[in-house]
Image: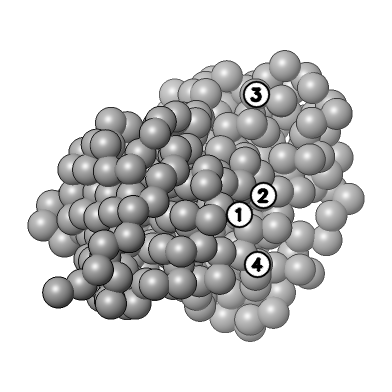
């Protein structure tokens, strides 16, 4: 019979996962700074979670952070792929071998990952620190859309199509372009998805002055009924459909809303540093969405 080791910690949890329900998970992947769990019996926003040690600068929309680093390191040292974790309200049980870990939860605090919807205006975006940052950064050259020829061709197609007419008024064209992006690229979150999710974040945060324009998020949701991508990307899409994203996006939105010029570059840098190129690919999507909104505004004038 396995020995039992007792540990303690408090938790910092994304409010997208609130309230935490009792679940049995299996370990899907393990990294130096955290691990992913998957839950197979139901389909909900808690069917996959990312566990890490407390890191306020890296709060994931699907994240649970342990405040006790020693407890986190003990868990990480004993984990194997496929092992089970039973997450309950007051405690966790990690079925590792040869030692079972019993983890008492002292406190659970939730952090905000809900995007402020419709609070940003195009006129404000044009003069914001966001535009200064994007214009002064070599996002394309540092993104996967520069490094991989098929992705580069897709990005150029967006540029070329947008020169002909306002894409946000052409449902057929933009749906075709979105479909080509879904699942394209490498990694846990393919770059095409990162690009689209950057567009969706901006769409959620910006006001919808023109009611006739195509909604990117709605088009993606419909296309995902026919086309698929990685499971991690699907989880991020689900969060965005509900109006949630990694906390740095929420912090960026509030800084823009309150014209806090000192904070905008800081949150943008955090976003840009996601993954190998994921953050840059998302910001390239942000840049594209702002361009499409500018094109639409110019068409209406």
Say whether disc 4 or disc 2 marks the residue closer to the N-terminus: 2
Name the quadrant containing residue 151: bottom right
Say whether disc 3 or disc 1 marks the residue closer to the N-terminus: 3
C-alpha span from label 4 to label 2: 10 Å
The residue pinned by badge 4 equals 277
The residue pinned by badge 1 equals 282
Q: Which mark is residue 271?
A: 2
Secondary structure at numbered mark 4: loop
Residue situated furthest left in the rendering? 41
Say whether disc 1 or disc 4 marks the residue closer to the N-terminus: 4
Say whether disc 1 or disc 2 marks the residue closer to the N-terminus: 2
Report the residue at 56% width, 46% height from top: 54
Cβ–Cβ under 8 Å for marks 1 and 2: yes
C-alpha span from label 1 to label 2: 8 Å
Q: Is 92 drawn above or below residue 108 in the view shown?
A: below
Residue 283: percent from the left, percent from the top?
66, 51
C-alpha span from label 3 to label 2: 15 Å
**Whether residue 163 is visible:** no
Say whether disc 3 or disc 2 marks the residue closer to the N-terminus: 3
Report the residue at 74% width, 64% height from top: 140
Secondary structure at numbered mark 3: helix
Secondary structure at numbered mark 2: helix
Classify the position of the C terminus by image quarter: top right
Q: Which mark is residue 254?
A: 3
Cβ–Cβ under 8 Å for marks 3 and 2: no
């Amino acid at each position: 019979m396995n020995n039992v080791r007792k540990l303690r910690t408090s938790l910092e949890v994304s409010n997208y996962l609130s309230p935490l329900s009792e679940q049995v998970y299996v370990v899907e992947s393990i990294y130096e700074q955290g691990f992913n769990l998957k839950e197979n019996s139901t389909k909900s926003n808690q069917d996959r979670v990312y566990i890490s040690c407390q890191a306020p600068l890296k709060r994931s929309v699907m994240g649970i952070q342990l405040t006790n680093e020693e407890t986190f390191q003990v868990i990480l040292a004993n984990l194997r792929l496929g092992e089970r974790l039973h997450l309950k309200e007051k405690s966790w049980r990690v079925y590792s071998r040869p030692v079972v870990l019993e983890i008492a939860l002292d406190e659970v605090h939730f952090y905000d990952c809900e995007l402020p919807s419709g609070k940003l205006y195009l006129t404000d975006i044009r003069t914001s620190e966001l535009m200064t940052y994007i214009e002064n950064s070599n996002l394309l050259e540092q993104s996967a859309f520069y490094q991989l020829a098929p992705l580069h061709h897709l990005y150029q197609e967006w540029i070329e199509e947008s020169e002909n007419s306002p894409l946000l008024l052409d449902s057929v064209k933009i749906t075709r372009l979105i479909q080509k992006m879904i699942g394209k690229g490498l990694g846990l979150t393919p770059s095409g998805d990162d690009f689209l999710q950057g567009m969706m974040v901006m769409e959620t945060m910006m006001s919808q002055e023109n009611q006739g324009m195509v909604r990117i998020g709605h088009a993606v949701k419909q296309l995902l009924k026919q086309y698929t991508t990685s499971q991690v990307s699907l989880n991020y899409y689900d969060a965005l459909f509900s109006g949630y994203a990694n906390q740095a996006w929420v912090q960026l939105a509030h800084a823009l809303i309150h014209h806090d010029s000192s904070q905008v570059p800081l949150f943008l840098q955090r976003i840009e540093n996601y993954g190998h190129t994921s953050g840059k690919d998302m910001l390239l999507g942000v840049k594209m969405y702002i361009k499409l909104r500018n094109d639409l505004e110019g068409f209406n004038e």
